[in-house]
Amino acid sequence: MTSTCRAALLAAALLASGLAACATAPGRPVLSGDMPPPPAATAAVDYVRDVHSYARPEVARVTHVDLDLAADFQRNILSGTATLDVSAEPGAQEIILDVRDLDISRVRDAATGSDLRFTVGEEQAFIGRPLTIQLPNGAAGGTGKISIDYATRPNAAALQWLTPAQTAGGELPYLFSQGQAILTRTWIPTQDSPGIRQTYTARITAPAELTAVMSAEMLTPQGEAVSGDASRKAWRFRMTNPIPPYLIAIGIGDLEFASLGPRTGVWTEPSELAAARAEFPEVEAMVEAAEGLYGPYLWGRYDLLVLPPSFPFGGMENPRLTFATPTIIAGDRSLVSLVAHELAHSWSGNLVTNATWADFWLNEGFTSYFENRIMEAVYDRDRAVQEQVLAWDGLQAELAELPAADQRLHLDLAGRDPDEGMSTIAYDKGAALLRTIERIVGRERFDAWMRGYFERNAFRPMTTERFLEDIRTHLIAGDTRLEQQLMLDQWIYQPGMPSNFQPPVSDAFANVDQAALAFASGGPASAIPWSGWTTQQRQRFLGWRPEGQADNSGWLSQGQLADLDGTLGLSDAGNSEVEYAWFQVAVAHRYEPAVPAIEAFLKNQGRRKFVLPLFQSLWAQGDWGRPIATRVYAEARPGYHSVTANSVDEVVGWTGR
Ligand code: BES
Ligand code: ZN
């Protein structure tokens, strides 16, 4: 038995589950026939106005997207046809889609082949343009099919086209997409609002050496011949659950698959596969734990795609196929809570979806809470609480910086890039609200309500108001004392943390804080019990600041920093979270010897959560940090995805476009 297998069995035994986890050899997954039947036609939806979309779903809406696209790695464009099923109200004349940087060449009634009139409107920042199309004859009061011939542009914000040199293998190119929040419109002409759900199918052609994967069932595990072109292959996909368009995702590269369990697996470039497999033996157990908490997993398979290092996020919950940064592969499974998080989105986010980005907390707050419950179930309470405390540390730091209006769970994002709302408030204040409710009503009652919430609202958009209605109807049920105790309106509509919040406390951090104080007071680094600590304890140690310490003034001497780095090997820790936390300490102290490692870190991966704050910290260090930031950014920027580059551009005043 391989050690990976043994680890999987250990994890499985924990839950008395999944012996089959090792019976499946690496190879292609079982790809079809395993998606539960789609939900019955969704009940009428009350559409709410989405300020980030031109769509008017109450007049005419897209219900299905069929893509037939060719990936051109010479020109970095996707081109072909999107055929949309639309459903329209009586009297409707046109349908409005969202597009940004798309070249539309022709629009036709797919039933008759006749041309349909269309106009592409004015460009608005972030949002793009409305594509207004005359409805096919007979579609008003019923349905129709519209086909759109189009091409993306090389700079499409959702897409990153990687040269072979930017991949692990170094020989073949790579393409991946990132749709959330409003980037799908840069590669698919559709109604790009999270409240408008669509099923999808796709046929993608690509150079024959590459494999295409999508957030869908793969219908062609080996790919199919493309008639008249032996150099290419076609891949077909099907998503039968209606999903918001930000979850349509694609990856094309030199990909291989390894099975992790009966319905779980991982895709990566071949050279990364063994490490990925070894990192994720618990994924099957996580799916089982999640189902045990909040109901059946409705998406069939749960696979991971570990992307090249420029992937701008830690993870993205694309249905059936979570996209993940390679920076979570630490060699010791210490960062797998990210998988628990993306998996949890299969309920909070992908089943019950924020209707607009103003209610992003309904996706991320629920998911962060759920993630931590999965970690508690698969590991133990101690690990879960350590992660809660780290999140609370981060939230406190953010609360100290954010304007009051952005400390509320429900946000006003009119005129703003939805990306701006995406702070730790949604995640960690959101999760803290649910944890507070759990503490007050008891876990059993809370879990029963959560299960019901997912069931009642599956495949539907959710708003803060509807959430309040649901919890008042199904949990509070007229208990006025409970209503008062919960302070829901204050949590949602007021800044800061309400008085019924109790900060998490981890016993495992008490000796960490002691060691940090002892070291800051002049003790040697050799006295720090580093090797016995978890990654979370190490993060806590490196995030420690003396009481009342402003973040950017030095509390350690250069000699202490050298002792710390030399004794603990921090610049070369091999764990992205630990290295990141150390680099923040180093930058705050203008610790020159760490600069080469910081530079390498910024060039070797493009995860925004690491890259953006490090550039901010360098910038904050004025005449010391700004020249470093400017020099490193000029070299690193070409390797970043637009999501990361756009954020950092503002920090360093990048103009060299
Ligand atoms: N859905 C988010 C990623 C996202 C958020 C993309 C907003 C675009 C806009 C994903 O589930 C997420 O939260 N990822 C986190 C990891 C998580 C463990 C907190 C990340 O990428 O750091
Ligand atoms: Zn998330």
Image (spheres, rainbow, N blue to C red):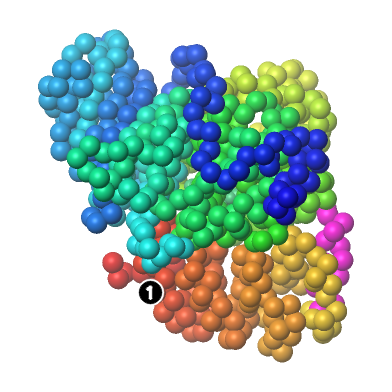
* Residue 435 in the figure: left or right of residue 307: right
Image location of residue 14, percent across then percent down: 81, 41
The residue located at (69%, 78%) in the rendering is 569
Residue, far bottom: 559
Look at the picture and state if 290 lies above or below 139.
below
Image location of residue 528, percent across then percent down: 83, 75
Q: Is residue 269 visible?
A: yes
| Rendering quarter of residue 236 | top left
Image location of residue 70, percent across then percent down: 27, 43
Q: Is residue 513 magenta?
A: yes
Look at the picture and state if 648 lies above or below 314.
below
The residue located at (12%, 22%) in the rendering is 114
Image location of residue 384, percent across then percent down: 77, 48
Look at the picture and state if 585 lies above or below 120.
below
Nearest the eye: 550 or 277: 277
The residue located at (47%, 80%) in the rendering is 628
Nearest the eye: 18 or 192: 18
Type of amino acid under label 1: Ala
* Residue 81 in the figure: left or right of residue 51: left
Q: Is residue 102 visible?
A: no
The residue located at (36%, 59%) in the rendering is 172
Magenta stretch mostly in which secondary structure? helix
Look at the picture and state if 486 lies above or below 326.
above
Q: Can you tell me whether the CB of the residue at mark 1 lies under 8 Å from the nearest atom of ligand 1?
A: no
Q: Is residue 280 magenta?
A: no
Nearest the eye: 183 or 46: 183
User: Range of the magenta residues?
Assistant: 504-519
